[in-house]
Amino acid sequence: MDAALGINDIPHRLEGVAKGYIEPEKYFNIFTNSDLPEDEDYKWFKDNVVTMFDDHDMVSLADDYKYRFSADEETSPLLLNCILLNMTTLGIPCLYYGTEQGFDGSGDSDPYIRECMFGGKFGAFRSQNKHFFNKNTSLYKGIKNIMSLRDENVPLKHGRQYLRPITYSSDQEFFIPQKEDEEEDH
C-alpha cells in the first residue's frame, strides 16, 4: 500500500485550524520527518497520507450529527482558507466532491452530507433535481489559483513544513500563530 486515508483525526484538525478552533501545532505536528513512528505519537509520513476535511463518511464526527465545512454560516467564508491549507501543506490533498461548490449539507444521516451535484434524485433536501456544478464561482476560481500555485512551486508538494513566526504589522513582535480566544480581538 502506497498511501492511507487520513480520515480519523486529520479532518477535525485541518478544519479546526482553518476556523481558529484549535492550535495550528495540533495539525502541523501530525507530519514529521521521522522514519520510526511510536505507537502513542501521531507521526505520519508526509507523502503517504491523504488529507481532507469533507468526506462522505465523516468518521471523525459523532454518529448522530454530520456536517460539511460550509454548514456553519459564520465560518463558511473560511472555506477557501481551509482548501489553501490542505493544498499547500504536507500530505496528499483531496477535495470531496461538492466542496469546490461550497456544499453545506448537515444532518443526522448520511444523505445530508451526500448532496447531488448534477441534478439527480438522491441527495440532501436542497440539492435534489438541481445542477450545482459552476466553474464561474469565486470559490472555484480560487481553488484553480491555489492549484496553479501548487503546480508551480514544487516545495509545496514535496518539501518540509515548519510553523514560522508571523506579525500583523511592522511595529508588532513576531509570534507563532495560536488559537484565538473569543475575548481576544485582533
Image (tube, rainbow, N blue to C red):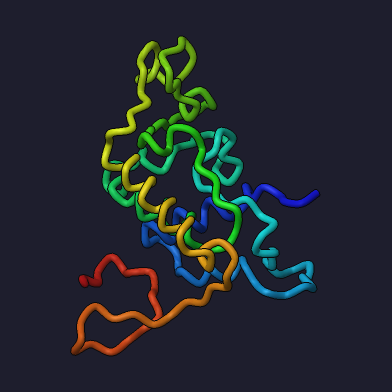
Quarter of the image where one finds residue 136:
top left
Please tell me which residue is depicted at 51% across the width and 23% down the height of the picture.
111
Q: Position of residue 137 (x, y in %)?
A: 27, 36
Q: Is residue 137 left or right of residue 118?
A: left
Q: In the image, what residue occupies the spot 43% across and 32% down?
A: 98
Q: Examine the rendered structure and indicate whether residue 37 appears above or below residue 57.
A: below
* In front of the other: 112 or 181: 112
Nearer-the-camera pick, 44 or 118: 118
Q: Position of residue 154 (x, y in %)?
A: 53, 64
Along the line of sight, which residue is nearer the eye, 148 or 27? 148
Residue 45 position, x and y percent, is 70, 64
For image coordinates 41% across by 14% down, the residue present is: 119
Q: Is residue 122 above or below residue 163?
A: above
The percent coordinates of residue 166 (x first, y second) are: 34, 80
101 versus 39 height, above or below: above
Q: Say if 114 sits above or below 137 in the image.
A: above
Q: Quadrant of the C terminus?
A: bottom left
